[in-house]
């Protein structure tokens, strides 16, 4: 509680300092708009910002969920089969190393300039942290627990569901947290290159007009969307923690 | 008491069992053709220095490792893989951290799809016997090492196995807790009449708990000496302070030391 108040106080102080600085130091509002101007921009273009914000939000959320599903499924498959792992890991690593942003224009070539392109790109960059988290988590089961399963004659599914999955969840959650921010980043980059709609598009458009306040207003909304996405994972983590009721092994519990 | 009648089928028997691990560059010979059995109701201690292959013997009895030569019989039948009526306890308690103590004890029932209602009374009774009454709802991280290992005993016994296999179950504990656990097991043994193999490198534990002690040689493991413990049951932990007890432990210590010298020569 005191921690939360301290954070809020720090934010308020920063906003006040920012406002004061822009007012008392002669600086062009095109270079840095004060918080009041951002609030004004938000109030001035509600329809525009909401429309584009909604497009960004739902593409990012959907992209995140699909990336989470794909990452968990492929991660589970790769940890189940050594052969599959040997066959696919070189690709996974190669795709990890490629600067993924550089592939964004290719997605436009393949999928056009619509929502499918932006979501596909979001899935593409959000999927890796989930895959890696799932694999690391499933590999991290205590060997003694696996031996216990063998002694008891547990089936492969029972071992996965009753033992390996609970051990894997902390690592998986860490992967999902990264994926939540990556999905939003992917959508924004997609909006930059497709230049059709979304807050990323508003940022590009506003910047080209020198409308710094509008740009910052869009970024404020992007922060809000990012927080909501991150909150989804945090809620999942909280629910898991309530069930787990023990210190998490990896110490991922914030 | 061990059932000595010749017609009685042994709980488990090793026939000329050998085990080699295909390690590189040199294969590791862990067990050298050993033969022994455990009678129904008998508690057999396998005593030997660390790394002598005695844990490998237990892994084979648990059906987790296959012998390279020879065969195992479980209740007169060939042993293939883990057996439903065998309870196993390891060096570490390996309780699942997200389950309560009671749910950990009931975990074997969960895996075997036995309704918890059928075994919960037995689980509670076992927890009471080992002194964990009141800790049913606690999580493993809230327990001491000794308490966790007690919960692991209950888990191994909850489905009422006829054979209990214990691989140095108390070696991760401090000396005082260790003696305490020996007493718990001794007490538990007065009430149950199960067969058991108890692997240990503690001479005191072996003589105090077992009906018979097999002393293993250094790797590859062979039976260096077999000793029937002459003390009647029920036994009291104070037995360990008597001259008779000390004489036996001194003898066994000599056997183990002789085996080690043979290794050096």
Image (cartoon, rainbow, N blue to C red):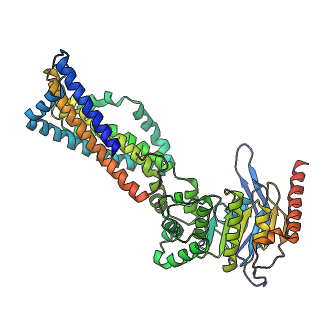
Q: Quick one: quadrant of the N terminus of chain B?
A: bottom right
- Direction from residue A198 to residue B156 in the image, left or right: right
- Direction from residue B22 to residue A132 in the image, left or right: left
The residue at the point 54 percent across, 62 percent down is A149
Please determine whether, in this image, residue A132 is positioned above or below residue A218.
below
Residue placed most toward the observer, B251 or B235: B235
The residue at the point 60 percent across, 63 percent down is B147
Q: Quadrant of residue A242?
A: bottom left
Please determine whether, in this image, residue A121 is positioned above or below residue B1.
above
Residue placed most toward the observer, A244 or A34: A34
User: How far across and how far down the image is residue A82, in percent?
Assistant: 51, 48
Residue A106 appears anywhere in the view: yes
The residue at the point 48 percent across, 69 percent down is B110
Q: Quadrant of residue A121?
A: top left
User: How far across and how far down the image is residue B142, in percent?
Assistant: 53, 59
Residue placed most toward the observer, A89 or A231: A231
Most extreme residue toward the front is A2
User: How far across and how far down the image is residue B258, in percent?
Assistant: 90, 56
The residue at the point 40 percent across, 34 percent down is A95
User: How far across and how far down the image is residue B167, in percent?
Assistant: 68, 62
Please determine whether, in this image, residue B191 is positioned above or below residue A199.
below
Q: Quadrant of residue B62?
A: bottom right
């Amino acid at each position: 509680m005191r921690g939360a108040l301290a954070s809020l106080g720090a934010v308020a102080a920063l906003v006040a300092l920012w406002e004061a600085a822009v007012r008392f130091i002669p600086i062009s509002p095109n270079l840095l708009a004060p918080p009041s101007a951002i609030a004004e921009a938000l109030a001035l273009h509600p329809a525009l910002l909401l429309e584009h914000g909604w497009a960004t939000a739902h593409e990012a959320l959907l992209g995140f969920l699909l990336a989470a599903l794909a990452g968990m499924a492929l991660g589970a498959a790769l940890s189940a089969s050594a052969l599959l792992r040997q066959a696919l890991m070189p690709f996974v690593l190669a795709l990890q190393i490629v600067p993924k942003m550089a592939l964004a224009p290719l997605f436009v070539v393949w999928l056009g300039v619509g929502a499918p392109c932006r979501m596909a790109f979001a899935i593409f960059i959000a999927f890796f942290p989930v895959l890696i988290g799932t694999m690391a988590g499933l590999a991290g089961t205590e060997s003694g627990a696996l031996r216990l399963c063998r002694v008891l004659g547990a089936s492969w599914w029972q071992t996965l569901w009753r033992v390996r999955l609970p051990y894997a969840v902390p690592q998986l959650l860490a992967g999902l947290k990264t994926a939540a921010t990556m999905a939003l980043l992917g959508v924004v980059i997609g909006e930059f290159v497709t230049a059709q709609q979304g807050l990323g598009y508003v940022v590009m458009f506003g910047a080209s007009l020198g409308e710094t306040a509008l740009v910052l207003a869009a970024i404020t909304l992007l922060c809000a969307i990012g927080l909501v996405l991150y909150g989804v994972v945090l809620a999942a983590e909280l629910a898991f923690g309530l069930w787990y009721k023990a210190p998490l092994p990896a110490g991922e519990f914030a | 008491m061990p059932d000595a009648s010749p017609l009685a089928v042994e709980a488990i028997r090793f026939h000329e069992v050998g085990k080699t691990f295909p390690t590189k560059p040199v294969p590791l010979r862990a067990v050298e053709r050993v033969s022994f059995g455990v009678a129904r109701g008998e508690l057999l201690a396998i005593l030997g220095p660390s790394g002598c292959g005695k844990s490998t013997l237990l892994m084979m009895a648990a059906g987790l490792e296959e012998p390279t030569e020879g065969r195992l019989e479980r209740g007169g039948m060939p042993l293939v893989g883990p057996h439903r009526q065998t309870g196993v306890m390891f060096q570490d308690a390996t309780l699942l951290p997200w389950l309560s103590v009671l749910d950990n004890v009931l975990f074997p029932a969960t895996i075997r799809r036995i309704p918890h209602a059928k075994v919960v009374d037995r689980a509670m009774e076992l927890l009471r016997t080992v002194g964990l009454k009141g800790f049913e709802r606690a999580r493993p991280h809230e327990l001491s090492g000794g308490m966790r290992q007690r919960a692991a005993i209950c888990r191994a016994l909850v489905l009422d196995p006829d054979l209990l296999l214990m691989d140095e179950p108390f070696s991760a504990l401090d000396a005082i807790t260790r003696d305490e656990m020996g007493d718990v097991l001794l007490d538990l043994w007065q009430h149950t009449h199960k067969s058991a193999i108890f692997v240990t490198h503690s001479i005191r534990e072996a003589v105090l708990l077992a009906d018979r002690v097999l002393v293993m040689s250094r790797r590859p493991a062979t039976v260096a000496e077999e000793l029937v413990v002459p003390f009647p049951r029920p036994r009291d932990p104070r037995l360990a302070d008597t001259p008779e007890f000390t004489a036996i432990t001194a003898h066994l210590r000599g056997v183990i030391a002789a085996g080690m010298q043979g290794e050096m020569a």
